[in-house]
Amino acid sequence: MTMKSTLILVSFLTLVYGTPHSRDLLVHERRDDVPHGFTHKGPAPADQTLTLRLALAHTDVGGLQDALYDVSTPGSSNYGQHLSKEDLAKYVAPTPESAAAVTSWLSENGLSATVLSPAGDWISIETTAAKANELFDAHFSKFVHASGKETVRTLSYSIPASLKSHLDLVHPTVTFPNIELSNMPLASVPLPLSAREPSSDTAPLSCNNYITPKCLQELYGIPSTPATQDGNQLYVTGLEQNYANRADLRAFLTQSRPDMSPNTTFAFQSLDGGQDSQNISEASGEADLDVQYTIGVATGVPVTFISVGNVQDGDANNLLDLTNKLLSQEKVPQVLTTSYGDNEHNISRPLAEKLCNAFAQLGARGTSVLFGSGDGGVSGIQPGNCGRFVPTFPATCPFITAVGGTRLVSPIEVAANLSSGGFSNYFGTPSYQVAAKQAYLANLGQTKLGKSLRGRYNASGRGYPDVSAIAESVLIVTQGESGLIRGTSCSSPIFASVVALLNDGLLAANKTPLGFLNPLLYSEAGMATLTDIKLGNNSGCGTEGFSAVAGWDPVTGLGSPIYSKMASALGL
Ligand SMILES: *[C@@H]1O[C@H](CO)[C@@H](O)[C@H](O)[C@H]1NC(C)=O
Ligand SMILES: *[C@@H]1O[C@H](CO)[C@@H](O)[C@H](O)[C@H]1NC(C)=O
Ligand SMILES: *[C@@H]1O[C@H](CO)[C@@H](O)[C@H](O)[C@H]1NC(C)=O
Ligand SMILES: *[C@@H]1O[C@H](CO)[C@@H](O)[C@H](O)[C@H]1NC(C)=O
Ligand SMILES: *[C@@H]1O[C@H](CO)[C@@H](O)[C@H](O)[C@H]1NC(C)=O
Ligand SMILES: *[C@@H]1O[C@H](CO)[C@@H](O)[C@H](O)[C@H]1NC(C)=O
């Protein structure tokens, strides 16, 4: 008896002291179901080590956005006066109260944090699954994907009520890695190419068969004269063990840019142990495309391939590490192109907001950040079944430039039906886009198409893409063979190359680089430098999707570049 009551007493005590904070804990993020393809395989072992990232609230998110617009909006007195690392910190660093509240809560729980970002807004802790479950009232579990890959996640977590205004999120928790995407990076659908070599007298007709840098020079008026500014940097993101091969690049330049030295190559930067495999059988169509259509289009601009390792935790972590790395540099690259993404709803809203904010920071520092919009038309990153249209991220982040896809050179460039576009469910309409979007929606509302699409999209969200470029039948060399590739993975490096060449001219004229592009592109002067694409649509979800029309549309954005008009609008 005594024994028993002691036991009861002991266990009661355990209950009381074991979860002393539970009354203060508030659910912070949760998801209702396990994503398609994953199976719950029981709790994570109690002693399994977890590395969790904590995002502290920024001092002044509104201030950051104002500062970004201030340096990016033509006509503003601070246009082009991009922020230094120190200037930026005053908006982004957590307040001393937030930092103290989170650190003291961690140390009460026997944990110490490592700072991950230059402004101190991202920290990480290492703990066990058992401890994390207690701390965050979570159930970290093993989930196995159909591919066999295992991942540890929780379907919900809580944080103390007192930290609500100090701690934005904990990751990885409810956002799962998109393993399907890992096997199929945005775009890269290699098609066999007939043995024919491209002829050197590329008439417009052959550019309808396959696109080469020469076709793009003709179509968009891109100069072939080499850029001159060594300080100009065009960065190409490499994720998910996609490696760019130098021998493929050399073969591509020999074939498609005989006027350039075949020795022209990329610089390499490794992040999180990212590799630079030059084993030809590990060359990736995606990465080969990305370097071939930057080096081969932005003639003479220094290109860096940045390979991000640590693929275990998925793209969100990779993109976080990438932005933190670039933001920690005294000098940021003037252009960053990334051909990877995910469906917006696959990333939790707080995490998407935080990532989007990191892109805003890069923009404020002077980087033009471009992403492909995705390859599934209105059904998201890849074709799929859906009722409501599926927007893609980071394309829906209002602080990046999302590049959609087009096809054909003659008689006229039209929308590629793979071009993802639509409206965000997370981000509202940015000020620079209000007029363009309203004009589109007002017009759509009066059409039969508009009535048939009602309820499929969120008209209040940020519309994407912003611009577009060729996305079909693009010639590359990969693993020693020529092939045609399609996807907005082609469009982003092409548009990025145009921006990089314009920056070369600006730097040569002692002017500042373009930085965040959208306020300029959506201005009247900016729109006049683009070819408005008015034909085609982005089918998906069992519909024909949206239609490309005069003015901005959620298929091709404002249109494709006209280099000479862009250059003269910039006084070059
Ligand atoms: C991503 O989105 C697709 C399409 O909606 C869905 O089938 C899949 O389960 C999601 N994957 C993850 C990892 O969230
Ligand atoms: C390319 O590099 C090789 C080996 O370094 C050199 O012999 C050759 O002259 C270079 N070609 C050009 C066009 O610079
Ligand atoms: C090259 O990569 C392939 C595929 O990953 C591998 O089987 C092969 O052993 C590698 N070769 C070398 C020399 O590392
Ligand atoms: C999309 O366009 C391609 C050609 O670019 C065509 O083969 C395909 O059938 C089209 N798909 C739909 C759903 O219209
Ligand atoms: C629609 O988009 C807005 C952002 O403009 C968002 O706040 C809202 O939650 C979205 N609605 C749905 C149903 O997703
Ligand atoms: C969508 O595009 C296809 C192929 O280009 C075309 O046949 C169809 O008429 C278009 N639909 C609309 C509604 O514009």
Image (cartoon, rainbow, N blue to C red):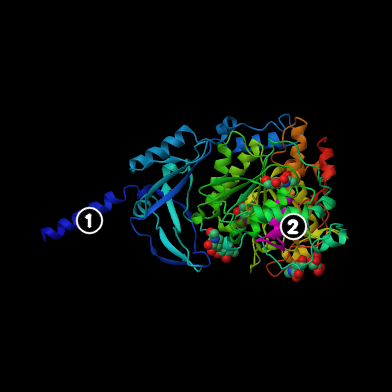
Give whichever of 438, 96 is nearer the camera: 96
Q: Amino acid at mark 2?
A: Gly
Q: Residues within 10 Å of mark 1 (few under 14, many from 20)?
A: few
Q: Which residue is mark 1?
A: 11
Residue type beneath disc 1: Ser
> Is 15 placed left or right of 250 in the picture?
left
Indicate the quadrant containing the N terminus: top left, top right, bottom left or bottom right: bottom left
The disc at residue 186 is: none
Residues at circles 1 and 2 in contact by the CB criterion of under 8 Å? no
Question: Would you say 311 lies left or right of 444 here?
Answer: left
Q: Position of residue 303 (x, y in %)?
A: 67, 44
Write down the residue under mark 2. Answer: 405
Cα–Cα span, label 1 and label 2: 63 Å
The residue at the point 42 percent across, 51 percent down is 158
Among the two numbered marks 1 and 2 on one chain, the one whose residue lies closer to the N terminus = 1
Say if residue 464 shows up in the picture. Answer: no
- Judged left or right of residue 218, residue 98 is left
Could you tell me which residue is drawn at 54 percent across and 54 percent down? 348
- Please say whether residue 146 is one of the residues in the magenta stretch: no
- The percent coordinates of residue 2 (x first, y second) are 11, 58
- In this view, the residue in front, 56 or 85, is 85
Residues shaded magenta: 476-494
> Mark 2 packing: few (<14 Cα in 10 Å), some, or many (20+)?
many
Question: Would you say 76 lies left or right of 172 here?
Answer: right
Say what secondary structure mark 2 lies in.
strand
Measured from the top left, where is residue 443 in percent x and y?
80, 56
Q: Residue at x 56, y 31 (%)?
A: 90
Q: Quadrant of the C terminus?
A: top right
Q: Is the residue indicated by label 1 positioned so its CB lies within 8 Å of ligand 1? A: no
Tell us which disc is closer to us: 1 or 2. 2
